[in-house]
Amino acid sequence: MHVRCQTLFDIPKIPTDNQIRDMLDPAEPKLLHPVFAESIAILEGVKGGLDKFQRLGGHVLVALDGTEYFNSKKIHCHDCSTRLRGKGEKEYFHAMLGATLVAPGHDKVIPLQPEFIAPQDGGEKQDCENAAAKRWLAAHGEQYARLNPIYLGDDLFSRQPLCEAVLAVNGHFIFVCKPSSHPLIQEYITGVNLQTYEHTVKRGKQNYVHRYRWIRCATARTP
């Protein structure tokens, strides 16, 4: 690599990893956002480029999920989130909400712009995945509405404000809804003959049945 950089690009000295980090750290992550949008535009420009990602009658699936990429009990900055561990010891961490174009049976995914989970100016409460998802939808939802997206998420996202935020940008959603988290919904569907899909998965010598149940809401757009 060192020889190629010298001969092809006339770079006399290759910077170390630490030097590259020092140069990139001051740069705003939003500077990279156009790259994510461009990758989608390139696929749209290729005949059939997005076909393998389309499901449920022409929709694309966008998975929303949080992830952590740093934690420490000593090192921290003003963008750190915090939590208490053990005997009240404070832990600092960085997290982000990832949005990814996915498709069942497809071994490739396409990352979209991330939304960082960090203390917000003027915010009294600590930032969270749900709030980050609302910001992501406000910033990018209309941009990707042309793809007819269905947003996927775990039980953290199945709350009315976020569902309304998805609908506001002409999206659809399939969010996990645990009975323990939504007792009112569980009471509402008691005795209702729900639409059900079962899928058997074999792991080793045992078979496991994954059972999915859902109900369509007349007041919301559903795929």
Image (cartoon, grey):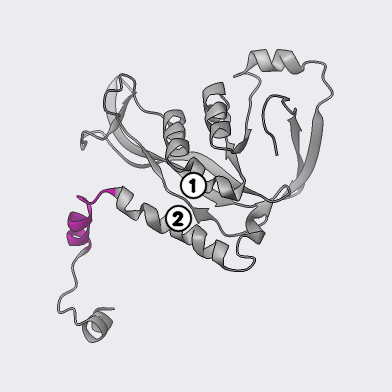
Q: Earlier in the sequence, mark 2 or mark 1?
A: 2
Element type at mark 2: helix
Location of residue 117 by image quarter: top left
Q: Report whether 11 appears left or right of 211.
A: left
164 or 82: nearer the eye?
A: 164
In contact (CB < 8 Å): disc 2 and disc 1: yes
User: Magenta-highlighted stretch: main secondary structure?
Assistant: helix
**Few, some or many residues within 10 Å of mark 2 (<14, 14–19, 20+):** some
Residue at the disc numbered 1: 143
Q: Position of residue 193 (x, y in %)?
A: 84, 24
Q: Residue at x 66, y 20 (%)?
A: 179
Q: Secondary structure at mark 1?
A: helix
Residue segment shown in magenta = 17-28
The numbered mark at residue 37 is: 2
| In front of the other: 204 or 158 | 158
State the separation of the CA atoms marked 2 and 1.
9 Å
Q: Is residue 30 above or below residue 178?
A: below
Q: Residue at x 59, y 39 (%)?
A: 152
Determine the residue positioned at 80% across, 33% down. 196
Q: Is residue 22 magenta?
A: yes
